[in-house]
Image (cartoon, rainbow, N blue to C red):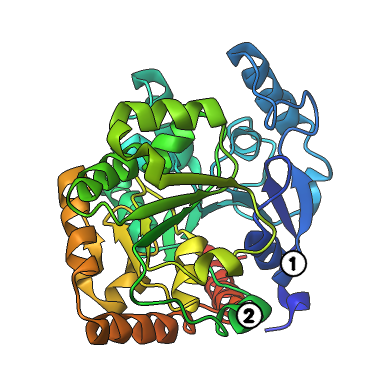
């Protein structure tokens, strides 16, 4: 289907910008881009509650060219488009609010991480959408669980992917099978983000595994506050701190993945986890929690690479993998790279377009 066939779409996203693959999703349906807090900015900086609420209201009522669009596609759940709907400023038959579900919100509602009032407000927001396009089976299941028997919003599934250039570069790597190096890739600037990424579980599990295998090392790549990381290591694995290194954000992951034995991701509701696919493309087997969206890819390699949110069991999985024979590790490595090829950016964009077209037909737009 040609993008000209789509109705007018507004892609509403946070600051500083949408995720790169989600930008390409939106471009593939010829969307106009609109930052969610174009009046009273707060999204990238944090703000007191009253300013957030006022910004939602103002940005909803003053949404630019609101009559032009047939679909308001939001990256995650956002209040301004819903406020347009609640206040009667949208034509409910001809204009629809659709969420690309790609963040922590559903799991935080499900696990009651949010306060009772925040959870109630988020559930009301979720139920006001006309359709949800979930970036993983995990997000789809969470949405269905939270919505219960409610017929709307309509639910759809898609997936994220890695660019052909990245896959080609990562495909040149051949990590060693004798290494004891574990790697994790992720970013965050707040405690909730670390909880979402499962850093506490990762550190505690590594400490337990290190006690039995002192040849293990852990490398954490990504932007985190150094003092926060140090406090977490001191809390969860003080005896293993000399075996843990923090690299900070890097331009290119290849040199770090090239000598890694295992990628471990203990996400709590991680919507997808593109770094998991990148590790697999580099032939580094990925081990993930059963609350990580990319588990659907990892399961195709081996269900044994999936663990529950329990540090003892994560440590056991790490030790199990490390004692495998070189032949078994090679089999998992080869299969990981094969599965990663199913998650290309091109396939992800194509799938999103088909899903979006199907959704538009179902919504009558």
Q: Position of residue 326 (x, y in %)?
A: 26, 82
Q: Position of residue 245 (x, y in %)?
A: 48, 46
Quadrant of res 323: bottom left
**Which disc, if any, is residue 27?**
1
Above or below for 115 versus 217:
above
Above or below for 65 versus 239:
below
Q: Position of residue 120 (x, y in %)?
A: 38, 26
Q: Residue under circle 2?
A: 169
- The answer, for residue 255, to whether it is visible in the render is yes
Q: Residue at x 65, y 18 (%)?
A: 47
Crowding at mark 2 (Cα within 10 Å: few <14, some 14-19, many 20+): few
**Which disc, if any, is residue 146?**
none
Would residue 365 be found to the left or right of residue 270 on screen? right
Gap between marks 2 and 1 measured at Cα: 25 Å
Q: Secondary structure at mark 1?
A: helix
Above or below for 363 versus 50:
below
């Amino acid at each position: 289907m040609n993008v000209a066939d789509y109705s007018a779409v507004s892609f509403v996203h946070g600051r500083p910008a949408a995720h790169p693959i989600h930008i390409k999703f939106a471009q593939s349906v010829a969307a106009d881009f609109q930052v969610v807090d174009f009046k009273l900015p707060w999204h990238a900086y944090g703000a007191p509650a009253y300013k957030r609420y006022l910004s939602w209201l103002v940005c909803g009522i003053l949404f630019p060219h609101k009559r032009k669009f047939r679909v308001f596609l939001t990256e995650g759940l956002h209040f301004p488009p819903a406020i347009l709907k609640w206040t009667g400023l949208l034509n409910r038959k001809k204009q629809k609010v659709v969420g690309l579900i790609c963040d922590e919100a559903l799991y935080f509602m499900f696990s009651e991480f949010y306060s009772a009032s925040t959870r109630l407000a988020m559930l009301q927001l979720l139920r006001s959408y006309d359709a949800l396009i979930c970036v993983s089976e995990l997000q789809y299941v969470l949405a269905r669980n939270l919505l219960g028997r409610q017929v709307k919003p309509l639910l759809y599934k898609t997936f994220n992917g890695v660019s052909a250039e990245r896959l080609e570069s990562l495909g040149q790597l051949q990590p060693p099978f004798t290494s004891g190096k574990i790697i994790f890739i992720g970013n965050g600037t707040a405690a909730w983000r670390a909880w979402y990424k499962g850093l506490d579980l990762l550190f505690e599990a590594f400490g337990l595994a290190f006690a039995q295998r002192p040849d293990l090392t852990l490398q954490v790549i990504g932007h985190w506050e150094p003092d926060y990381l140090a406090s977490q290591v001191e809390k969860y694995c003080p005896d293993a701190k000399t075996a843990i290194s923090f690299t900070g954000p890097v331009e290119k992951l290849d040199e770090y993945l090239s000598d890694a034995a295992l990628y471990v991701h203990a996400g709590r509701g991680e919507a997808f986890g593109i770094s998991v696919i990148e590790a697999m493309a580099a032939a580094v087997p990925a081990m993930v929690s059963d609350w990580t969206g990319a588990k659907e890819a990892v399961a195709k390699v081996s269900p044994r690479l999936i663990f529950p949110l329990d540090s003892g069991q994560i440590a056991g999985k790490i030790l199990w993998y490390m004692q495998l024979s070189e032949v078994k590790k090679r089999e998992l490595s080869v299969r990981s790279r094969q599965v990663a090829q199913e998650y290309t950016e091109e396939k992800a964009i194509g799938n999103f377009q088909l899903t979006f077209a199907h959704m538009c037909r179902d919504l009558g737009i």
